Amino acid sequence: MTVVVIDKPAPIVTPADVPGAHAANDPLVTMMIAAAQAHIDGPSGWLGRCLGVQLLEWCGSDWPWPVILPYPPLIEVLGVRYIDPAGVMQTLPPEDLIELVDLPDVRGDRHDVRILYRAGYDDPPANAKAAVILMAMGLASTTEANGGLRAFTVDGAFSRQFNSPELVARVRTQAVENLLQPLRVFS
């Protein structure tokens, strides 16, 4: 069984959602959002779920049973094609797949059954949006000219500079995992 992304997911946040001094359409922040979302979303991500709406194609050598397509939430099945035992490509109405009618025999070779479907959220959960924003902020912090170096100065007494990117990264990673845990699909 293989799932291929036909149309990439829609972004679930915009640069305007990410705090910071940047334009609402900043291309660098847009790229960071895309990278953060790709890390968790759909077939390429670790979450096991589609966040942004995307077009997927499930391919297998036989019908999935039970008929539960991976990477929920399922929006709609758009098309079902299969190769029959005689080697001829056939089409099955999507409602036949959903209503669990008797499914026809297939040849049984790799990718003989193909199911085209849309999955993802029209309005993604707030915790998913927050996780993508945190991840994008983490990527943005690595582009600061001083690497996130901070200074504490008491005039005339002393000045101290400090940086703890490891601690910040650890806290941010844990926050992202905690936000996404309720959405994770284990297979």
Image (cartoon, rainbow, N blue to C red):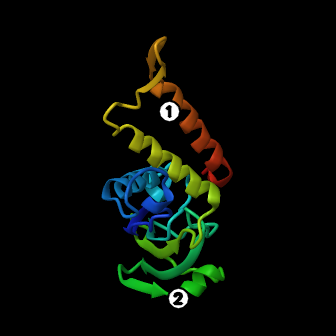
Residue 7 numbered tag: none
**Residue 98, percent from left and from top:** 62, 80
Q: Residues within 10 Å of mark 2 (few under 14, many from 20)?
A: few
Identified by mark 1, the residue type is Ala
Residue 14 or residue 113, whichever sits in front: 14
**Image quadrant assignment for residue 5:** bottom left
Identified by mark 2, the residue type is Pro
Examine the rendered structure and indicate whether residue 96 appears above or below residue 177.
below
Residue 169 numbered tag: 1
**Residue 179, percent from left and from top:** 64, 48
Q: Identify the residue at horizontal 39%, vertical 44% (top origin).
A: 140
Measure how far apart labels 2 and 1 are at the Cα level.
49 Å
Label 2 SS: loop
Q: Mark 2–mark 1 contact, CB under 8 Å?
A: no
Q: Residues within 10 Å of mark 1 (few under 14, many from 20)?
A: some
Examine the rendered structure and indicate whether residue 143 appears above or below residue 102.
above
Q: Is residue 143 visible?
A: yes
Residue at far top of view: 157
Q: Identify the residue at horizontal 43%, vertical 78% (top origin).
A: 82
Q: Is residue 84 visible?
A: no
Residue at the disc numbered 2: 93
Name the N-terminal-most of marks 2 and 1: 2
Residue at far right of view: 182
**Residue 81, percent from left and from top:** 43, 80
User: Of discs 2 and 1, which sits in the foreground?
Assistant: 1
Residue 50 or residue 130, whichever sits in front: 130
**Residue 79, percent from left and from top:** 47, 82
Label 1 SS: helix
